[in-house]
Image (cartoon, rainbow, N blue to C red):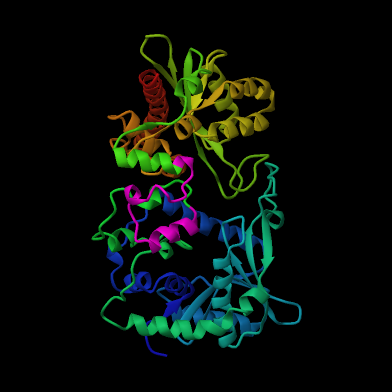
């Protein structure tokens, strides 16, 4: 078979989009670089993969990297022929110029094999089954008798006791042999098409679409859409537009919200959005004064930053439990300038006991606590469960929460929201001049990644610089809800 060698990952890339695959081979510099948050995802995958190997004592690691493929293939063959190892990790196989490295290859009692693909998620996905099918096709083509196959994920039901990880209970095996076998028929032909495509000097002509984000976000999307004329306010800005209605608008050739006929069946909020776009100004469509009436002074504003380790680190936690490591509180008192308090945990021990105490001190016992979304409420409940001696006090804090998100969603809409009610979309429209562009950290996922990096950084200056950037980001979040509350109050007065 001619053409470049494929791997299981490049095969999956090609199944998503031939253009993405072509770019990977011929124009990788056009990709948007991975940020710290995405790099943390990759690092997590490696960490989980290494831990999964502990389920198979006495297994043999084929350690040759991608620069030493012939050596990896030879070592795999030699270890299998020797018959001593009960499992192989990163075993290498090639069939018709498609190379795979199997996460785990387990020898069964009858001498046949079980293929295990390790994933750092908690749920089985269709793309994982295809991943296994590609490997199964190569392994069988290389002459290996594989009779079972599964996907090994983390088990969300596992609770760490704080003493020793139980690697058997930490993982959950999903058998997928039958499902993967059903996909084998088309893999060879598809691989051949990809290899033929990759020999061409011109990139395939494929327009951007929904496939750019399924099953993974394409790193070339910004490049592929750089010259596309974008609608001023496209129909994708309509909240919760069903696929059927989207298709009806596409069929009618309508891509701008303002062009949607009055007779078209939109729901109430979608009609508000259309009206705001047509008039080019904010629409107040609910009773803001009543919605804000429950807020009592002194008005506080709360935001948490969390990290969610795939492998639980603290007693009582499960895979991907969110662990708060930073909070910010702004407090408004009459006409005085707002005051600010925060806490950032700078150690690698469990931050929750100290954070809970500092949080109670910062929030006092009086006043409404404004948040944006239900996330802080969930964090308070989980914090109360983790620190039971402060559960009653934290429950009292939770009772004082006031969510500004439903107020915005139910009462007003500005064209500059562009269909999103995230605070980063709402804030610039309702409180101009306050954003995140001047910050070194402007995203919660990035904040979590940088905090974890800082904890392992031996450079004290760099670590403190990161901590300062994290504090500034969290402080901006609560300043944002403060400014937003004031903007909503002013809007309520003007609409009265």
Q: Is residue 194 above or below residue 373?
A: below
* Residue for point 68% across, 59% down: 172
As drawn, which residue projects farthest toward the bottom?
Answer: 1
Give the left or right position of residue 429, taking residue 182 as reference: left
State which quadrant residue 170 falls in: bottom right
Give the left or right position of residue 9, taking residue 315 as reference: left
* Residue for point 52% across, 81% down: 187
Give the image location of residue 74, x and y in percent: 51, 83
Give the left or right position of residue 356, taking residue 286 as reference: right
State which quadrant residue 115 falls in: bottom right
393 or 407: which is nearer to us?
407
* Residue for point 28% across, 64% down: 29
Give the image location of residue 59, x and y in percent: 64, 69
* Residue for point 31% across, 42% down: 278
Give the image location of residue 25, x and y in percent: 33, 73
Query: From which residue to which does the magenta span run?
Result: 242-269
As drawn, which residue projects farthest toward the front?
Answer: 263
Quadrant occupied by the C terminus: top left
Q: Is residue 282 above or below residue 51?
A: above
As drawn, which residue projects farthest toward the right?
Answer: 109
State which quadrant residue 139 falls in: bottom right
- In the image, residue 244 lies in the stretch drawn in magenta: yes
Quadrant occupied by the N terminus: bottom left
Q: Is residue 470 visible to the viewer in this orientation of the structure?
A: yes
Total tally of numbered discs in the picture: 0
Q: Is residue 456 visible to the viewer in this orientation of the structure?
A: no
Q: Is residue 22 above or below residue 40?
A: below
Give the image location of residue 26, x and y in percent: 29, 73
- In the image, residue 263 lies in the stretch drawn in magenta: yes
């Amino acid at each position: 078979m001619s053409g470049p060698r494929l791997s299981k990952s490049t095969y999956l890339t090609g199944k998503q989009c031939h253009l993405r695959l072509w770019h990977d081979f011929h124009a990788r510099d056009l990709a948007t670089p991975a940020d710290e948050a995405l790099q943390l995802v990759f690092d997590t995958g490696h960490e989980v993969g290494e831990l999964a190997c502990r389920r198979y004592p006495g297994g043999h690691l084929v350690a040759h990297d991608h620069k030493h493929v012939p050596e990896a293939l030879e070592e795999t063959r030699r270890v299998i022929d020797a018959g001593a190892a009960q499992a192989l990790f990163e075993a290498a196989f090639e069939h018709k110029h498609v190379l795979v490295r199997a996460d785990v290859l387990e020898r069964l009692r009858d001498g046949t094999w079980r293929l295990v693909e390790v994933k750092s998620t908690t749920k089985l996905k269709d793309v994982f089954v295809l991943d296994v099918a590609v490997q199964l096709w190569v392994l069988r083509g290389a002459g290996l008798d594989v009779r079972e196959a599964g996907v090994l994920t983390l088990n969300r039901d596992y609770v760490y006791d704080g003493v020793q990880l139980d690697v058997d209970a930490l993982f959950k095996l999903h058998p997928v042999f039958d499902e993967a076998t059903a996909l084998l028929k088309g893999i060879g032909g598809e691989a051949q098409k990809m290899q033929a495509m990759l020999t061409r000097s011109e990139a395939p002509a494929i327009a951007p679409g929904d496939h750019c984000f399924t099953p993974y976000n394409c790193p070339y999307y910004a490049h592929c859409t750089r010259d596309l004329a974008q609608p001023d306010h496209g129909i994708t800005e309509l909240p919760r537009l069903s696929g059927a209605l989207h298709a009806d608008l596409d069929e009618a050739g309508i891509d701008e919200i303002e062009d949607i006929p009055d007779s078209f069946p939109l729901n109430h909020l979608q009609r508000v959005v259309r009206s705001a776009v047509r008039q080019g100004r904010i629409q107040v469509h609910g009773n803001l004064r009543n919605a804000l009436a429950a807020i009592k002074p002194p008005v506080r504003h709360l935001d948490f930053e969390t990290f969610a380790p795939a492998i639980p680190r603290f007693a009582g936690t499960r895979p991907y439990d969110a662990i708060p490591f930073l909070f910010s509180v702004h407090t408004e008192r009459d006409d005085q300038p707002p005051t600010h308090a925060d806490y950032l945990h700078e150690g690698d021990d469990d931050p929750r006991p100290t954070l809970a105490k500092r949080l109670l001190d910062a929030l006092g016992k009086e006043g409404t606590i404004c948040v944006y979304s239900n996330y802080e409420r969930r964090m308070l409940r989980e914090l109360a469960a983790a620190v039971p001696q402060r559960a009653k006090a934290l429950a009292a804090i939770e009772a004082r929460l006031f969510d500004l998100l439903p107020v915005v969603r139910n009462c007003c809409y500005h064209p500059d929201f562009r269909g999103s009610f995230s605070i980063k979309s709402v804030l610039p429209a309702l409180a101009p001049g306050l954003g995140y562009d001047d910050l070194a950290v402007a995203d919660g996922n990035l904040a979590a990644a940088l905090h974890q990096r800082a904890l392992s950084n031996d450079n004290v200056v760099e670590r403190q610089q990161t901590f300062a950037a994290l504090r500034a980001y969290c402080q901006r979040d609560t300043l944002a809800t403060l400014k937003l509350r004031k903007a909503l109050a002013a809007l309520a007065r003007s609409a009265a």
